[in-house]
Amino acid sequence: MKKQDLGDRGAHYRHEYRGIKLDPYRIAKIYKLSGPQEHLVKKGLRGIRKGQTYEELFADLRSIIDRWEEMIAEDYAESAEVGFKGWRHATLEDSGDE
């Protein structure tokens, strides 16, 4: 069986700016992102370079945001009895995504 050439599958991770390697994981580390934030940045930076259409990319990004909102609401549903003002007022520190 002939091995198919898939090219450089990690090319979207290898960008440099002024001699510093910039990939989604480095950017997430610098900005102290994790979880859904990190995933949004990674997908957003990659864009449509892996064959997605813009419509598919935007649907993926919306899906990540929708789930993130659900997670925050789930995490803070139990906090209502202590005067929590609603998940929209939550900070990243509150949600554990620091």
Image (cartoon, rainbow, N blue to C red):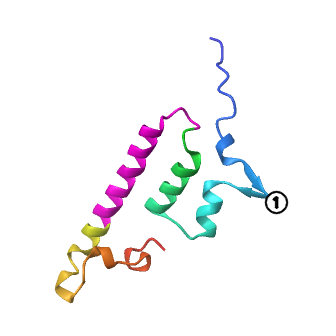
- In the rendered image of this protein, does residue 95 appear above or below residue 19? below
- What is the three-letter code of the residue carrying label 1? Arg
Judge left or right: residue 76 versus residue 42: left
Say which quarter of the image contains residue 76: bottom left
Which residue occupies the foreground of this view, 58 or 64? 58
State whether residue 9 is above or below residue 63: above
Please determine whether, in this image, residue 67 is positioned above or below residue 85.
Answer: above
Number of labelled discs? Answer: 1
**Image quadrant in which you'd find residue 5:** top right
Dot 1: element: loop
What residue is at 49 percent from the left and 74 percent from the top?
A: 98
The extreme bottom residue here reads 82
Seen in the image, is 86 located left or right of residue 13?
A: left
Q: Is residue 83 magenta?
A: no
Q: Quadrant of the N terminus?
A: top right
State the residue lying farthest toward the front.
54
Residue at the image position 63 percent from the left and 69 percent from the top: 30
Q: Residue at x 50, y 64 (%)?
A: 34
The image position of residue 92, as x and y in percent, is: 43, 75
In this view, the residue farthest toward the left is: 81
- Part of the protein shown in magenta: 49-71
Q: Residue at x 65, y 12 (%)?
A: 2
Q: Position of residue 91 (x, y in %)?
A: 40, 78
Q: Which residue is mark 1?
A: 18
Question: Where does the image place residue 21, in percent across and percent down from the top left?
Answer: 75, 56
> Is residue 56 magenta-colored?
yes
Residue 87: x, y in percent?
A: 28, 74
